[in-house]
Image (cartoon, helix red, strand yellow):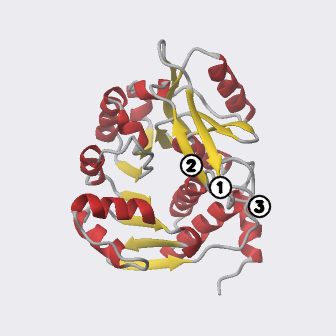
Amino acid sequence: MIQFLCFGEVLFDGLPAGPVPGGAPLNVALHLHQWGYRTHVASAVGQDANASAMRSFLAERDFPIMGIADHAQWPTGWVDVTLDEKGSPSYEICAPAAWDGIPFQAGLAAASEVLVFGSLALRNASSRAALEQYIRAIPRRVLDINLRAPFVDWTVIEPLMKRVEVIKLNRDELHEWLAFKGLEASVEGAEDLNCFAEHFSQAEHIIVTDGAKGAYLLAAGKVWHHPIFSVEVVDTVGSGDAFLAGYLHAQAQGMSVMDTLRWASAAACRVSGFRGATPLLDVQLLQEFLTQHPPK
């Protein structure tokens, strides 16, 4: 069985120092893969030099590519990434891209235990149709809200939020949803999270990352919080993806909610100390990092 199937964009992040493979689903999958989980990606690349470079990169990581299709018309995804003085990214995403036309693969779906997908891949009807089939076929679903203007349509995103067991988003995305619903946002703390949870009662876990203020996790009506770890930040590209991968790892290992938050926070903070979203970072290195940062 495939433990995790990550659906969505596979692309190159055009960072100031040069392009690196990326896309939130791929970032999450690469972390899970290097931590020993049977993980695949359902996506598509073009028939171009970037597709060849992507396959070469994945071969170096010994990552399976059976779920990554060839798109005959659209190019491999590309994002121009700009970093501010704090290393925080902004994005300009090319469209259309090959991952806008992801096909459904029945064999891949039948073999998968957990579906992980983001909101960006909903921008095109073709990929949305394939995602609908995956959602119906795979018993456990995790949705990572990744709002990237101008590709934001809550009328498309929100119905899927009601069909998953886990929802992850950041504080800004939570406030955008509140604005969409005509609800008032508070500045910090768990009040917004509780309001959000009232609308998605089927979700077992709701996660809100809040930058330098840490992260929150709501489960069974209770909210847990964990602060960030102190690291020298190189860039924060992919730190949210590392957080989600850390969460999935911790849950797969049967960790408590608090230990899950701690592990996920460590993964996010440690990745922000490297350039790019998917540095080589094995479980042992993260365990050593946690040992050096005991709970307060």
**Local secondary structure at mark 2:** strand
Kindly identify which residue carries mark 1.
Answer: 84
x and y percent of residue 144 in the render?
A: 43, 52
Q: Label for residue 90? A: 2
Report whether residue 30 is seen.
no
The reply to whether the C-beta atoms of the residues labelled 1 and 2 are less than 8 Å apart is yes
Question: Which badge, 1 or 2, is on the more N-terminal residue?
Answer: 1
Q: Position of residue 272 (x, y in %)?
A: 69, 59
Q: Residue at x 40, y 34 (%)?
A: 109
Dot 2 alpha-carbon crowd within 10 angstroms: few under 14, some 14 to 19, many 20 or more: some
Splitting the image into 4 quarters, where does residue 63 fall?
A: top right
Q: Can you identify the residue that label 3 sits on?
A: 285
Amino acid type at circle 2 is Ser
**Few, some or many C-alpha atoms within 10 Å of disc 1 (few <14, some 14-19, many ≥20)?**
few
Q: CA distance from mark 2 to mark 3?
A: 29 Å
Q: Is 7 located above or below residue 236 in the figure?
A: above
